[in-house]
Amino acid sequence: MTPELATRILTSTHTPTGGQLSLVRFNAQQPPLHSGTRLEVMTRASSEFVTLTKDYSGHHNLHRTARLQWCREHHNWTKQDWACVLFSDERRFSLSSDCRRQLNWRESGTAYRPENIQEKDRYPTCSIMVWAGIMINSHTRLHVVANGTMTGQRYINEVLLLHVRLFRGAVGDKFVFMDDNETCHRTLAVQDCLDSEGIQRLVWQARSPDLNPIENVWEALERQVAGQNYPPTNKNTLIRALTEEWDKLPQQLLDNVVQSMVRRVECCITLHGGHIPY
């Protein structure tokens, strides 16, 4: 099976029958890409493994050029400048592998042994979307997005007015708000709300989670939830576990990842706009 065929299988919109699973094995012998994107996939049809990586084809060169330009524009920002930024993001958590990630270390020649294959449900039935923001010396509460769908109006009511506005008032005129380019973040109503509240928005490059320090915090939160003595088993316990572990995250961890922005920008410039190993 060719990598192209495997990619088509993975991106197919075909609705699976009950119990249909993908067999996924993390390849620990290969150098990891950002967020551990190198993995091996075995299809039921061929029982053959192929190694897949993130595909940044198409507008890849334009995307890298835009990222490089953005980093050059922010290369002179100091840690004090970044300390005024509230970095935010949404993340979806589920009861499946999102909170139970693991690397499968194996001996050479043992790829097909059952103990080296992990079954994963590609369509988790229980998932929770949350939103949060971090900055130096502070962070927001973990906000659970009811029904798992964020719209522009909900973003205004539940995020901007409920959380971000408070940080703008506490920090003052130097406050900068970072969010990504999700459609619900970029409506005219959202921009009008930001303008009316005097909230300055940080221009952000598309497809750049590696530049957002909160991604590292999400990873830490996943590990904490997975390490609980009694991991969540349903929606309510998942919400409770996420909220409890978010409140336990040390502020020093959040400060450290925000302070890494200077290094992230420098690294991206060194890689000519390429994705960085964060």
Image: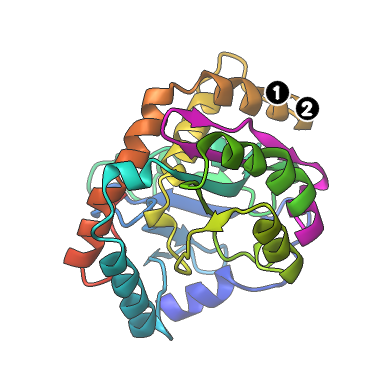
Q: What stretch is highlighted in magenta?
A: 132-155
Query: Is residue 96 shown in magenta?
Result: no
Whole-percent x and y of residue 218? 50, 39
State the colouring used for the structure image: rainbow
Rendered-image quadrant of the N terminus:
bottom left
Badge 2: residue crowd in 10 Å (few <14, some 14–19, many ≥20): few
* Residue at the image position 38 percent from the left and 66 percent from the top: 53
Residue ID for mark 2 = 236
Q: Residue furthest top?
A: 229
Q: Which of 44 and 223 is in front in this view?
A: 223
Would residue 117 be seen by someone viewing this image from the given angle?
Answer: no
The quarter of the picture where residue 164 lies is top right
Where 181 falls versus 119 (above or below)? Answer: below
Question: What residue occupies the far front of the structure in this picture?
Answer: 173
Left or right: residue 208 compared with residue 29 = right
User: Could you tell me the amino acid type at mark 1?
Assistant: Arg
Numbered label attached to residue 240: 1
The structure residue drawn at horizontal position 46% and vertical position 43%, both measured from the top left corner, is 214
Query: Circles 1 and 2: CB distance less than 8 Å?
Result: yes
Picture coordinates of residue 93 (x, y %)? 63, 41
Q: Is residue 66 visible?
A: yes
Q: Give residue 205's position: percent from left, percent from top.
A: 44, 68
